[in-house]
């Protein structure tokens, strides 16, 4: 009788192993959603004429239109910004008087 209960226990463990293995996830889900491709690219050519001018809504809109950028980031002195590079973003650096110091893509 001892032998049959041991066989039964092994059989139960084997069945449990099969059931648990069948419930396991085959592959892990992706950690994040893929980033869509960038369709627009920024070009700062011809925007040097804005240096020294106020960063008004009109000048910012003009810079965005001419550069082809989908995003504009106005960076003030001491402002923390992300270091990520974006082909579709125009960066406009200004001084404390909101005068444009530099225009570039990134």
Image (cartoon, helix red, strand yellow):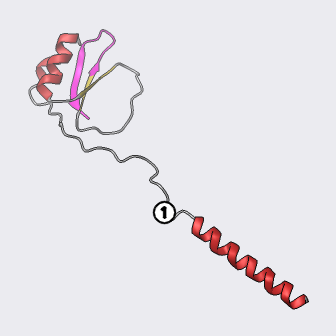
Can residue 46 be seen here? The reply is yes
- Is the residue 85 above or below the residue 93 in the image? below
- Is the residue 83 above or below the residue 1 in the image? above
Residue at the extreme right: 1
Q: How many marks?
A: 1
Say if the magenta span includes residue 61. no
Percent x, y of residue 39: 19, 40
Could you tell me which quadrant the C terminus lies in? top left
Percent x, y of residue 11: 74, 82
In the figure, is residue 92 to the left or right of 77?
left
- Is the residue 90 above or below the residue 59 in the image? below
For label 1, the SS is loop
Q: Which residues are magenta?
A: 93-106
Could you tell me which quadrant the N terminus lies in? bottom right
Can residue 54 be seen here? The reply is no
Bin the neighbour count of mark 1 within 10 Å (Cα to Cα): few under 14, some 14-19, many 20 and up.
few
The part of the image, by quadrant, that contains residue 84 is top left
Percent x, y of residue 79: 40, 22
Q: Which residue shows up at 54% across the image and 62% down it?
A: 25
Q: Which residue shows up at 23% across the image and 38% down it?
A: 87
The part of the image, by quadrant, that contains residue 73 is top left
Q: 63 and 27: which one is in front?
A: 27
Q: Which residue shows up at 64% across the image and 68% down it?
A: 20
Say if the magenta span includes residue 98. yes
The part of the image, by quadrant, that contains residue 21 is bottom right
Residue receiving disc 1: 27
């Amino acid at each position: 009788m001892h032998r049959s209960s041991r066989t039964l226990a092994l059989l139960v463990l084997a069945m449990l192993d099969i059931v648990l293995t069948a419930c396991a996830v085959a592959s892990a889900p992706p950690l994040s959603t893929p980033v869509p491709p960038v369709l627009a690219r920024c070009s700062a050519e011809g925007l040097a004429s804005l240096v020294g001018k106020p960063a008004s809504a009109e000048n910012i809109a003009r810079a965005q239109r001419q550069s082809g950028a989908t995003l504009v980031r106005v960076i003030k002195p001491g402002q923390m910004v992300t270091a990520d590079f974006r082909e579709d973003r125009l960066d406009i650096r200004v001084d404390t008087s909101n005068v444009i110091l530099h225009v570039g893509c990134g």
